[in-house]
Image: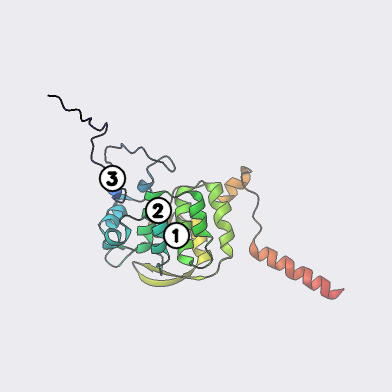
Amino acid sequence: MASNETKPKDSKPKVHLADAKALLDSRGLYEGQTFHGVNPLLLVEKIIRDRILESLYWKEQCFGLNAATLLDRATELTYIGGEYGNQKPTPFICLVFKLLQLQPEKEIILAYLHDPEFKYLRALAAMYIRLTWNAVEVFKTLEPLLGDYRKLRVRGMGGWRQSYMDEFIDDLLTKERVCDIALPRMMTRAMLEDAEELEPRESLLGSELESEGEDEEEGEI
């Protein structure tokens, strides 16, 4: 006698989203959202990806995170950096990699970026924006943060050092590699200005000098 049970259309076993390896199909069958024309996880070089996926922090602290619970992890960050010690990935780049996997809505990333309290959450969002958004969006979104002079602790292969948020943002806008991650190629500000995609930027120092000059003129009257 034939069974009345119907088989599900897709009988393939499903892998939990938290397993990033499921999004790194070696046969190139990725069908999700792309950034710069590629699977977002491939924006991180293979050797660093492998170290992240094998790290204790990734296995214990990143499994099953979503955009909301990742926020809890990000607010616990106390430094930025790429790899340290015996080429161990920092929690910072593990969470960057997790964001590439989750691909939160822009509104969520902007909420991270503009949080006034947690500076390492801001740094995390800035790094994600640089990796995934287009050049015009990157400059328009990150340049205002050049006025943020808060201190940042950085951990790397050479140990600990001190940096500042404005320096970190400037690195994201001008350097090819930040926190041991090669950044996607991006048109320079000068090129975008020539293409009339960006207005010339008024420097913060220039604004301060202009303001001082106006005060001096008022004092002479």
Look at the image and tell me in which quarter the C terminus lies.
bottom right
Q: Evaluate if marks 1 and 2 touch, with contact meaning CB atoms under 8 Å apart.
A: yes
Residue that badge 2 annotates: 99
Q: Could you say whether the residue bearing mark 3 is in a helix, strand or loop?
A: helix
Looking at the picture, how far across and down is residue 210, in whole percent?
73, 65
CB of mark 3 within 8 Å of CB of mark 2? Answer: no
First of labels 1, 2 by sequence position: 2
| Callout 2: SS | helix
Residue under the point 26% across and 42% down: 14
Q: Where is residue 208, by image quadrant?
A: bottom right
Name the residue nearer the viewer: 33 or 152: 33
Residue type (three-letter) at the residue carrying disc 1 = Leu
Residue drawn at (39%, 50%), measured in percent from left and top?
102
Mark with earlier residue (3, 1):
3
Q: Which residue is mark 3?
A: 22
**Can you give x and y, in whole percent of width and height, for residue 19 in the image?**
28, 50
Q: Which residue is mark 1?
A: 124
Tag 1, which secondary structure? helix
Three-letter code for the amino acid on which mark 2 is drawn = Leu
- Amino acid, disc 3: Ala
**Residue at 52% across, 63% down:** 115
User: Seen in the image, is 90 located left or right of residue 13?
Assistant: right
